[in-house]
């Protein structure tokens, strides 16, 4: 029944309006922007993208075995010296390519009159500062690459001063992320109690994540500055030839930079009654404390002790956590000291 005899096809099994093969139209690529849109890629953009990939992997310990200086068939080196040799060779190869006259117009070009920091620094300096902020295991490689390119390009007319541009954009990135860390920059969290109440929970969590990520980038950029100082790119402290530089605000040394952060931390501690500056002093102090281990061989003992004394006396001495212990799942934060009841050893009872 139902008309389903031999050879019967339901309506949905075979399209009733099948066109003749000769009437079929050729189908183009599944690209609504047109078939030739992918062929108009800017060669300069493609080369810079390739450069980003190479620089991002030049000091990668996990992939050093397949790096530029090692054949693709080699396995990742287990020996530290072999890994360092590979990374050193990768750095030398990149210096020869990036700092040479042939590619200077592409990688080292900059516009000193531009108000945009990437254009004023150039593509390579911008890339190095970005990698230093996000790839912490390769930071020493980026310090070596910056120094090598600076030396290589210093003899090229119009391209000298690479390290100055590198330090400038690195510092600019640091201050931008520091604003985000303290809740004063773009994408920062609420800055007043009213804003906190009006901000939804999801947006508040997103803002907190943004501030934490910015704080981590600040730590990496400060460490990069310390390594640049060890490489001789940044002065460790004010020059003896002009001791008034620090007093006049002209001191561009690492010591002056760290002292500025400590002074800001102390000022924030004195103004922490408002929501905007809450915990700002601790965040600033933690940045300095995180950087000091990388400066032990370049800063004097007097400078190190002075920084530590200012932090300990003005910030850590009066610091107390602002977190309030909770209940339920939040009870991991204990409300007070927990003392366990004395437990009698069962073995001792049996012996008695």
Image (cartoon, rainbow, N blue to C red):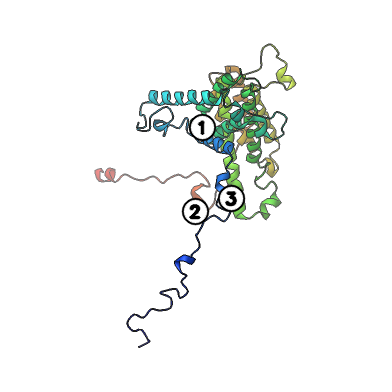
Q: Quadrant of residue 132?
A: top right
Kindly identify which residue carries mark 2. 329
Q: Residues within 10 Å of mark 3 (few under 14, many from 20)?
A: few
Residue furthest out toward the front: 22
| Mark 2–mark 1 distance (CA, rounded to whole Å) | 45 Å
- Residue 285 screen position, x and y as percent: 61, 32
Q: Would residue 22 be visible to someone looking at this image? A: yes
Viewer-side label of 1, 3: 1
- Mark 1 or 3, nearer chain start: 1
> Which residue in the protein does label 3 denote?
205
Q: In this image, 277 relative to 34: left or right?
A: right
**259 vs 23: above or below:** above
Q: Foreground mark, 2 or 1?
A: 1
Identify which residue, 306 or 169, lies in the foreground.
169
Residue 55: mark: 1
Q: Earlier in the sequence, mark 2 or mark 1?
A: 1
Going from N to C along the chain, the mark reached first, 2 or 3, is 3
84 versus 15 height, above or below: above
């Amino acid at each position: 029944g139902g008309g389903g005899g031999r050879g019967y096809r339901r309506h949905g099994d075979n399209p009733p309006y099948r066109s003749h093969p000769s009437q079929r139209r050729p189908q183009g690529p599944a690209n609504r922007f047109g078939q030739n849109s992918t062929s108009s890629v800017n060669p300069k953009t493609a080369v810079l993208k390739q450069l980003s990939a190479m620089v991002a992997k030049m000091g990668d310990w996990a992939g050093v075995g397949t790096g530029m200086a090692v054949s693709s068939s080699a396995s990742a080196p287990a020996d530290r010296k072999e890994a360092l040799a590979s990374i050193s060779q990768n750095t030398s190869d990149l210096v020869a390519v990036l700092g040479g006259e042939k590619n200077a117009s592409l990688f080292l070009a900059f516009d000193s009159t531009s108000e945009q920091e990437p254009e004023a620094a150039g593509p390579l300096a911008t890339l190095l500062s970005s990698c230093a902020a996000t790839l912490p295991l390769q930071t020493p490689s980026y310090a070596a690459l910056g120094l090598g390119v600076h030396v290589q390009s210093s003899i090229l007319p119009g391209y000298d001063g690479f390290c100055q541009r590198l330090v400038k954009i690195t510092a600019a990135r640091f201050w931008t992320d520091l604003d985000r860390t303290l809740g004063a920059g773009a994408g920062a969290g609420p800055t007043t109690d009213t804003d906190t109440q009006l901000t939804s929970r999801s947006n508040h969590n997103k803002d907190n994540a943004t501030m934490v990520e910015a704080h981590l980038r600040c730590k990496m950029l400060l460490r990069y500055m310390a390594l640049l100082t060890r490489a001789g790119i940044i002065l460790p402290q004010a020059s003896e030839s002009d001791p008034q530089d620090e007093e006049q605000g002209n001191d561009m040394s690492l010591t002056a930079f760290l002292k500025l952060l400590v002074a800001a931390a102390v000022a924030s501690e004195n103004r922490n009654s408002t929501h905007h500056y809450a915990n700002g002093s601790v965040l600033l102090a933690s940045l300095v404390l995180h950087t000091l281990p990388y400066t032990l061989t370049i800063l004097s003992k007097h400078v190190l002790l002075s920084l530590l004394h200012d932090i300990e006396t003005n910030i850590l001495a009066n610091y107390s956590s602002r977190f309030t212990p909770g209940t339920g799942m939040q009870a991991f934060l204990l409300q007070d000291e927990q003392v366990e009841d004395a437990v009698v050893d069962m073995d001792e009872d049996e012996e008695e």
